Image: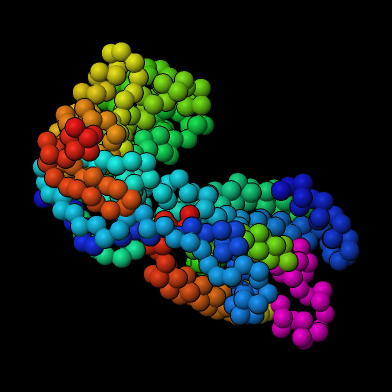
Amino acid sequence: MAVTIASIGIVFGTIFSTPMQVFLPYLASGMIMWAMIAGILNDGTLSFIAAEGMVKQLPLPKIVYIIRVVWRNLIIAGHNIVIFPLVVLIVGGETSWAILFWPLGVLLTVTALSGLALFFAIVATRYRDLPPIVNAALTVAFYITPVIWIKESLGNNELVNTLVSLNPLYHLLQVARLPLIGQMPSVDNWIWAAASGLVFWIIAALMFRRFEKRIAYWV
Amino acid sequence: MAHISLKQASVVLPIFNSSSRSLTNSLVSAATGGVLTAQRGGHISIEALKNLDLEITAGDRLGIMGHNGSGKSTLLRLLSGIYEPSSGKIERSGSIASLVDISLGINAESTGRENIFLRGKLMGLSKKEIDEKIDEIIEFSELGDYINLPVRIYSSGMLLRLAFSVSTSITADILIMDEWLSVGDGAFAERASNRLRELVDSSEILVIASHTRSLIEETCNKVVWLEHGVIKKVGPVAEIVPEYFGD
């Protein structure tokens, strides 16, 4: 992860002609948080399939399998986040009181994505081609979400800006990333992040209520 | 009082082929009315259990007999709450412990001690309960200092001793087993058998699937004879077992 950030940082920092002390912390925070987001969704989709043996042998509450995956990705993110203060130490960068909102942002993002992961997990257990579909979609999402590129560099094209703002992952990434680099996510970011989380969980809860008992049959 | 009752309970297992497991295929065929996909429609289903009526009450030592594929394992899963009946009802009261796969959840990289916690948690013990029992578990497993080493270096016998010691350290109202657990050799096998016997005696209900006549006759007081997912006969051991074995 550190090597990836350093390599992309040097190339893209030059392309965007942004000073390293602005770009590297931006990139590091974005890459680390994106790895967590993608990890929760990718692994989350496999929650039941990967735990087939347990699903078929133990009458555990099904939500445990989702929590397992989310927890694992939080631990991984906890290891990766160590890179961030190192980056700030080396190249410098801004921090501010906004960092106090970081735990809240991460909590919101993780909670919202857990809902989406639960939804994917149920569908993937029945339809086995969903995991590669989610995986491919996340690769696309990585490029259309401002993870390594800066949204401002799109210029004033209103259509493109609107399209970026329609992407829920953009807002979820913003609330988990911006506090790290000393910026407060906009009210829009918070509202969109919370709203998408709510929608994910409503869909997931409906699916779960309907299909919880079928999961053991499908794995 | 522990008790389980099945009312007209059925388990229908869907058998998906690769086409019906594909979201893209299903979406395409929904959108085109099935014109584009060569294979029409869905999957076959197996009626693993059909309209079972069964009452199990405290004191019952129920043996399940039947040929391979007659639905024994499915019935065990239904009783332990892994499968919900696809139709019909199941009512259950009392805590359940399944000894069907005692090595489930063992992590090869973790030490024996850590695995006691992993396995104990999966069986529904709290951390405090495991703390209280851990010394006894380690002593019974006879693993000695190996308990602090990763499980991947254990011999298969040691691994089974560990899994057995944890899994039998629980107490439950209802105990579910697939064949009698036999672990280790010589002296250990005998101690293990005694420990299992004690566990069985302390539980209110035992459900055990087995092919072994002597086991059923010694352990059980009631037998269910399954054939092709239907209960062919149910009754006391003395009546059903001789008939099942054809004498």
Q: Position of residue A74 (x, y in %)?
A: 54, 53
Name the residue rendered at 48%, 61% in the picture: B44
* Left-right relation of A13 to A208: right
Question: Does residue B186 appear in the picture of this structure?
Answer: yes
Q: Main secondary structure of the magenta part?
A: helix
Q: Position of residue A65 (x, y in %)?
A: 45, 54
In the rendered view, tell whether residue B160 sits above or below residue A109: above
Please tell me whether residue A163 belongs to the stretch shown in magenta: yes
Instruction: Tell me which corner region of the image, top left, top right, bottom left or bottom right, holds residue A26.
Output: bottom right
* Left-right relation of B224 to A109: left
**Furthest residue to the top?**
B186
Instruction: Pick the residue in front: A211 or B245.
Output: B245
Please tell me whether residue A10 belongs to the stretch shown in magenta: no
* Left-right relation of A118 to B216: right
In the rendered view, tell whether residue B43 sits above or below residue B80: below
Q: Position of residue B103 (x, y in %)?
A: 40, 34
**Furthest residue to the bottom?**
A158
Name the residue rendered at 84%, 60% in the picture: A13
**Furthest residue to the front?**
B247
Name the residue rendered at 31%, 25% in the picture: B182
Question: Does residue A41 appear in the picture of this structure?
Answer: no
Instruction: Pick the residue in front: A69 or A107.
Output: A69
Q: Which residues are magenta?
A: A141-164
| Colour mapping used in the image | rainbow
Instruction: Pick the residue in front: B27 or A53.
Output: B27
Instruction: Pick the residue in front: A102 or A12.
Output: A12
- For the image shown, how many numbered marks are present on the structure? 0
Name the residue rendered at 72%, 81% in the picture: A163
* Left-right relation of A193 to B35: left
In the rendered view, tell whether residue B131 sits above or below residue A136: above
